[in-house]
Image: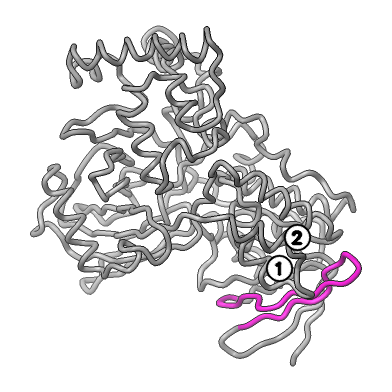
Amino acid sequence: MNKIKTETLIIGAGPAGLACAMELSKAGKDFIVIEKSSQVGGLAKTYTFKETDGLVFYTDNGPHRFFSKNQNLYSFIEGLIGEDWIKVRRQTRQFIDGKFYDYPVNPVQALVNIGPIMASRMLLDYLWAKVVYGVFGKEIRTFEDYAVANFGKSLADFNIINYTEKIWGIPSNEIHAEWAVQRIKGLNVTSVLKNFISKIFSKNKNSTPKSLVDEFFYPAKGTGLIYETIKNKLEKLNYKFFMETYPVSIKHKDNLIYEVVLRSKEGDFIIECKNLVESVPVTEFISILGPSVPKDVKESISKLRHRSQVYLFITLNKESLTPDQWVYFPRQENKVARVSEMKNFSKEMSPAGKTSLFIEFFCFENDKIWNSTKDEIFEIALSELSSAGFFEKNDVRNYYLIRQKNVYPVYDLDYQRYLSVVKSYLDGFNNLYYIGRPGRFRYNNQDHSLEMGMLAAKSIIDGVKYNMDSVGEEKEF
């Protein structure tokens, strides 16, 4: 079997892996990148669809707005893509019971939509929640606890709890409160009202929670442009990328990983390395380590679950559908979870006079939605979205089905206990850096994955193993 030697092997060419590669290249370090897909970008890749009449449509693998409080990341990306790094005015809405609701919330619009009876009930429930969780000090253990404590039962059920249960496929009282702390920290009735008032009277947004920001940056031809640019730059510097290649065995001895067996279309080969940087889903990574991992690690890894997604991308003979970048469908009776009109991110994502819609469905691998055919998924989307007024069947040019495994790490009530066992074992390897959303079983945003990659590179360059969990630990993201 053919052998190659390198100082650092990077497995996975997503945001984390490519940020690491870019930083290592600046220090003149030797490395090789391998990627299972035919395309770089991981969960942040951009697809290109050229149709029979020659028109070209682009879509991300899900909507990827970029917002960060790390100014170095803006400089990093602007240095890569320059004028193709554009600022976008955000517009997002929720579609609930046949009505659109602005997000960030417009309290006046919301009150008109829900009516005085429901509004009164929401107010009473909110006040009661302040008594239960504030005065009597009920413990916040679950996502449901967090949402009810901050919004009251009726308002929490109206959109936050419903949509969260749709994402994870489990009840909100089985979801860890850490998910709420990570995703909606600082978001409550008070912050929503303050944000609404500040837009009227002030331009100061320093205290705005990240979920309420109304501007973001975006690459003109999709977020994948960032990662394709990194790959092109590195290849010009003679760094090697092995695409459609993945690890089948990882060998270690004396707390060091020294050899990785890889599989490609051309056959198997071996890379010997001094450092391994990887963003393989941790549940898969453990399974290919040899010698075999301890029994408690195997048992713990078997308890960690991922949520997968099915996407339908529809191209349309319409100028526009909505003014929104994305629209949420919180109700569980809607199988559609979220739709993104890509030209509202950038006009270059669709040809002139045409538009497109990226539609997301949450599922577990091998459940009914996962196993449905392209036509079956299209009929679900058509039924739900045509009745909501988005488009009709005769507006459709084409539609494309995409399946994506291991998109969301499931934050159930016990995940931290099991994950700590796995991380304790992996941290024992002195030359291993496991990064990114899949690698660390952590719901990273794109900016945090970039930071992790940079920190892994800094660890290798400085010869110091820095703490990956420090990235984003301020909780406000």
Give left or right: position of 412 versus 300.
left
Q: Earlier in the sequence, mark 1 or mark 2?
A: 2
Q: Residue at x 60, y 39 (%)?
A: 74
Which label sits on residue 25?
Answer: 2
Q: Which residue is mark 1?
A: 237
The prevailing secondary structure element of the residues shown in magenta is strand
Is label 2 in a helix, a strand or a loop?
A: helix
Is label 1 in a helix, a strand or a loop?
A: loop
Q: Residue at x 86, y 59 (%)?
A: 430
Quadrant of the rendered structure where residue 398 is? bottom left
Tell me the quarter of the image containing the C terminus.
Answer: top right
Residue 251 is a magenta residue: yes
Give left or right: position of 356 versus 420.
left
Q: Which residues are magenta?
A: 243-263
Q: Position of residue 12 (x, y in %)?
A: 62, 65
Residue 258 is a magenta residue: yes
Determine whether label 1 and label 2 are within 8 Å by CB: yes
Pair 1/2: label in front: 2
